Image (cartoon, grey):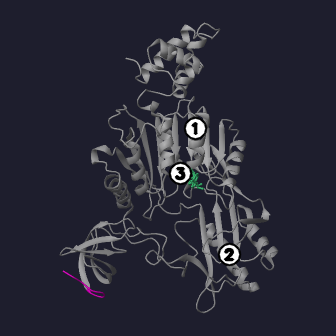
Amino acid sequence: MEFKKNDLLTVTIEDMGHDGEGIGKYEGYTAFVKDAVIGDTVRVKLMKTRKNYGYGRLMEVLAPSPDRVEPPCAFARPCGGCQLQALSYEKQLEYKARKIRNNLKRIGGFSDAEIPMEPVIGMKHPLGYRNKAQFPVGTDREGHLVTGFYAGRTHSIIPNRKCLLGVPVNETILDTVLDFMEEYGVTAYQEDTGRGLVRHVLIRYGFRTGEVMVCLVVNGTKIPRQEELVRRLAQIEGMTSITLNVNRERTNVILGKEIRVLWGQGYITDFIGEIRYQISPLSFFQVNPVQTEKLYGKALEFAGLTGNETVWDLYCGIGTISLFLAQKAGKVYGVEIVPDAIADARKNAEINGIGNAEFFVGRAEDVLPEKYAREGIHADVIVVDPPRKGCEESVLDTMVKMGPERIVYVSCDSATLARDLKYLRERGYEVKKVQGVDMFPETVHVETVVLLSKGEIDSKKVRVEFSLEEMDMSGFQKGATYEQIKAYVLKHTGLKVSSLYISQVKRKCGLDVGQNYNLSKKEDAKVPQCPPEKEAAIMDALKHFQMLE
Ligand code: SAH
């Protein structure tokens, strides 16, 4: 059947898509319906049509789904922040598990049996969880100042100072700022003309410390009578940091680069587990501290650390995961592209007295291959937590070459996760555990943490394009690299062995040794000989890596 714009139809919602939209069928025609939940029978008006499918507006719920609930927020439908408020929390978690599973199947090519997934870890109280909010300030048609959230896919502000995902202090701060602006005639920024002063109010709250940060984003360098505003804000309980962010660009990027401290300090602190973090207005910090602790706890569990391991944490931000892991690792190396974040990471290591974490600024895809090629760096475990677009292929390639026992992949987008897992699986890594964590209740987003481990390497499984010339295949064909053998020996016996000793033992066992270790000319010169104790340890490692029977 074909339909056209404004046609009305009745459908039963059978599924929900990636953006939370209900999906229903009418005689082979598929309708996507925002705000309808799985199990609803709804009356829909088609707004946009294609041959076999169309996008409809929910006109009426004819028979509500047993899983439909009254959205806790009055603005749930127009607001662009939440998509799943009309679905019971239990079903939200099931929806997220399905989303992960479907991506792993469709994009990753995994079968159900190959996805060892536990139920998504949810929250006891799935509201009031955000430690950060950015409220745009604007003017309504009558000329009154307003603040709230953008309506879905637009930049028109829905006035609401009481977002239920946020903390109560948000409303007190917004009332203080807007009352002050009304009183002193301070203007709101207008996106269309680029005029007006106050653009956004950014608020951060430390759940464990109770510290409050307000950052006023302005199209200028100061606010008229700002000392009065600061005086009022400073009276709010927990106030720790009041800053001004200068953003004079005609852009919808919220924050500018410059921060001026108006009162108190330029940052707040908060804890995740036992680790204390300094957080400045520009830093990335997970927004749901309660669930972050569970997420990092899983990452730590999956990393399987015993105290000696060398761990790489790629895309490390302000070192949150790195420092969490450093508590149980021998050494942690973090890599991150934003220099300020690395400065924070170093400071965070210092304030927690953590001496076994080191940080590098740069793109993961540059830093890791370079360190590997130049220094032959080693990793027992690699943790990655990339942005939505996932990992660059060069990062994945280097990871495979480094051959860590375990890879822990933390992902905020299960589609790119699935793509990357497929790549790693084709190169010998097995997916051992998949765990969703609900960091963003009421929304369609879900965080996933996956444990991969180096399986029995079968070189036939390694794809042909994984060419011998380009790559160090020692991890696959000839067993382990010298670095891996050294690390294995150190871990299991506490002995340090040199490449020379390894080459001597390998030769003794009839194994191929590289050019550099072919010492035949100097055979009778005074070359140190591997002591028996170390020889035994190296033999064990060679057996472990299946280089010896
Ligand atoms: N692991 C951190 C941050 C994760 S967010 C935490 O849990 O808090 C992803 C981080 O990757 C951001 O800090 C971003 O700045 C950084 N990033 C983005 N592209 C990158 C790249 N190509 N190389 C290294 N880091 C990158």
User: Is 313 on the left or on the right of 298, as rendered?
Assistant: right
Please identify, in this view, whether the residue under mark 1 or under mark 2 is nearer the observer.
Answer: 1
Quarter where residue 232 is shown = bottom right
SS state under label 3: helix
Report the amino acid beneath label 2: Glu
Q: Residue placed at 52% from the left, 12% from the top?
A: 535
Instruction: Identify the residue under disc 3.
Output: 292
Please identify, in this view, whether the residue under mark 2 or under mark 3 is nearer the observer.
Answer: 2
Q: Is mark 2 within 8 Å of ligand 1?
A: no
Q: Main secondary structure of the magenta part?
A: loop
Report the amino acid beneath label 3: Thr
Please tell me how crowded label 2 is: few (under 14), some (14-19), or many (20+) other residues with Cα within 10 Å: few
Quarter where residue 162 is shown = bottom right
Please tell me how crowded label 1 is: few (under 14), some (14-19), or many (20+) other residues with Cα within 10 Å: few
Report the span colored magenta: 1-7
Q: Is mark 3 within 8 Å of ligand 1?
A: yes
Residue 179 pos. (x, y %)? 70, 81
Tags 1 and 2 touching, CB below 8 Å: no
Q: Which of 519 and 250 lies nearest the eye of the viewer?
A: 519
Instruction: Identify the residue under disc 2.
Output: 249
* C-alpha separation, residue under disc 1 versus residue under disc 3: 34 Å
* C-alpha separation, residue under disc 1 versus residue under disc 2: 41 Å
Instruction: Identify the residue under disc 1.
Output: 373
